[in-house]
Image: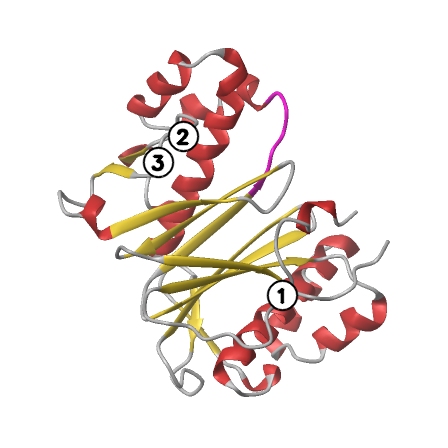
Amino acid sequence: MMSHLIPWPFEPNTSILGSNDVHVWCASLDLKPSQLESLYETLAEDERARARRYHAQKDRDHFIVARGRLREILSRYLKISANKIHFCYGAYGKPALASSTDRQPLHFNISHSHGMALYAISLDREVGIDLERVRPGVMKENIAQLFFSPYEVEKLRSLPDDLQQKAFFNCWSRKEAYIKARGEGLHIKLDSFDVSLCPGEPPTLLRSSAGPDESSRWSLYDLNPGKDYAAAIAVEGHDIRIKCWQWGETPTG
């Protein structure tokens, strides 16, 4: 069940976050009931209310674990208890540390898909992360034509059939990471900017309607959380050191 986490080493004894570092944590969202209850106890009342709004038990449990793990990971850097962390939210819903909690300029972002979550932590740099479960046959759903830019669609169609799925998820995860880093979500039209997507090419923001300097503002990186997943991270600035770890806890199964 956990084979997709094997390439990521277990968490180190200490985590020192430098100004050019971005730490990425990978965690399972499938936990034992006792572990789930422990994480639920760390949540704020608004998070518990959000959890109760999920109709499906699995979705509710995954939300609890995702937010509880976020609190645990942040507590490692902030040196305070997980239940003492307070969040605020941007105009488009991106979470951030409230001023009462943020003892250092930490930025973070989270993405989860099919039982796995990725967390990105940076020091005084905007960051966005995206995780996607790779689904065979996605090329038949016309998603690229609906959401990708004309440049990206043309590039995708120019590739051999056996490379198109990889290119599609390269493009999708990089675009999602970028708009999440910007903190505006889907208020940024996905066809208003171009990213590289061809397998073997470096991940790059090629063009953005936000302005001529936007491409030079951001760095994109691919992540490899495991088989059947695609992931990317967008970070403000350059010369970034990405360090990836698995959050150590025994899942169910």
Sooner in the amino-acid sequence: mark 1 or mark 3: 1
Sooner in the amino-acid sequence: mark 2 or mark 1: 1
Find out whether residue 135 is within the magenta segment.
Answer: yes
Which secondary structure type mostly characterizes the magenta part of the structure? loop
Residue 199, percent from left and from top: 43, 27
Q: Height in image: 176 above or below 184?
A: above
Span of residues in magenta: 132-137
Q: What amino acid does circle 2 point to?
A: Phe
Task: Give the residue at mark 2.
Answer: 147
Residue under the point 67% across and 61% down: 53
The secondary structure type at the circle numbered 1 is helix
Give me the C-alpha separation between circle 2 and circle 1. Answer: 29 Å
Determine crowd level at label 3: few under 14, some 14-19, many 20+ residues with C-alpha closer than 10 A.
Answer: few
Residue 111, percent from left and from top: 54, 53
Determine crowd level at label 1: few under 14, some 14-19, many 20+ residues with C-alpha closer than 10 A.
Answer: few
Find out whether residue 88 is within the magenta segment.
Answer: no
Determine crowd level at label 2: few under 14, some 14-19, many 20+ residues with C-alpha closer than 10 A.
Answer: some
The secondary structure type at the circle numbered 2 is helix
Q: Height in image: 70 above or below 134?
A: below
Q: Height in image: 203 above or below 65?
A: above
Give me the C-alpha separation between circle 3 and circle 2. Answer: 21 Å
Q: What amino acid does circle 3 point to?
A: Pro
Residue under the point 43% across and 61% down: 93
* 241 or 163, nearer to the observer: 241
Residue under the point 78% across and 74% down: 37
